Amino acid sequence: MCNAVTDHDIRREAAAGVQTFAELQARTGCSDCCGCCDAEARATFDQARSQVICQLPLVTA
C-alpha cells in the first residue's frame, strides 16, 4: 500500500480500536494521496473491524 502503510498496519489499528476509515487515515496516512489504494484499504479495514472481539466486563448476579 502507499505511504508505507501495510495491511498489517491497518489490521493493527483496527484491533487498537480505530472505529472509522477517516480515523484510520488520520492515524496512518493511508489512502490520502491519489486514492489508488482506497478500495483495497477500505476492504482490509472493514474485514479487520469485523474480526475485532469486543471485550465486555463480566457481570455476575
Image (cartoon, rainbow, N blue to C red):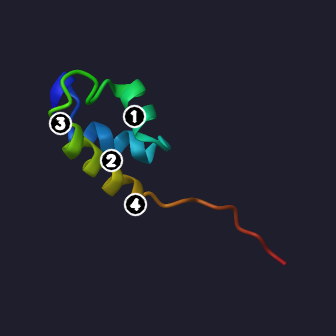
* Label 1, label 4: how far apart the Cα atoms are: 15 Å
Residue 50 in the image, given as x and y percentages of width and height: 40, 60
Name the amino acid, label 1: Leu
Residue placed under numbered mark 4 in the picture: 50
Residue 21 spot, x, y in % from top left: 40, 39
- In this picture, is 24 found above or below 47? above
- C-alpha gap between disc 2 and disc 4: 9 Å
Circles 3 and 2: CB distance less than 8 Å? no
Quarter placement of the N terminus = top left
Give above or below for 30 relative to 59. Answer: above
Task: Give the residue pinned by disc 3.
Answer: 37
Label 4 and label 3: CA atoms lie apart by 20 Å
Residue 24: image tag: 1
Q: Which type of secondary structure does the marked residue at label 2 adopt?
A: helix
Label 3 secondary element: loop
Crowd band around label 4 with a 10 angstrom C-alpha radius: few (<14), some (14–19), many (20+): few
* Circle 2: residue type: Phe
Please, what is the three-letter code of the amino acid marked with disc 3? Cys
Task: Give how far across and how far down residue 41 sits, in percent.
Answer: 25, 42
Cα distance between the residues tagged 3 and 2: 12 Å
Q: Earlier in the sequence, mark 4 or mark 3?
A: 3
Image marks 2 and 1: residues in contact by CB distance under 8 Å: yes
Q: Could you give the CA–CA distance between mark 2 and mark 1, rounded to whole angstroms?
A: 8 Å
Closer to the camera: disc 4 or disc 3?
Answer: 3
Q: Name the residue under label 2.
A: 45
Looking at the image, tell me whether mark 3 or mark 2 is earlier in sequence order. 3
**Within 10 angstroms of label 1, few (less than 14), some, or many (20 or more) residues?**
many
Say what amino acid the circle numbered 4 marks: Ser
Label 3, label 1: how far apart the Cα atoms are: 14 Å
Q: Residue 7 versus residue 25: which sits nearer the camera? A: 25
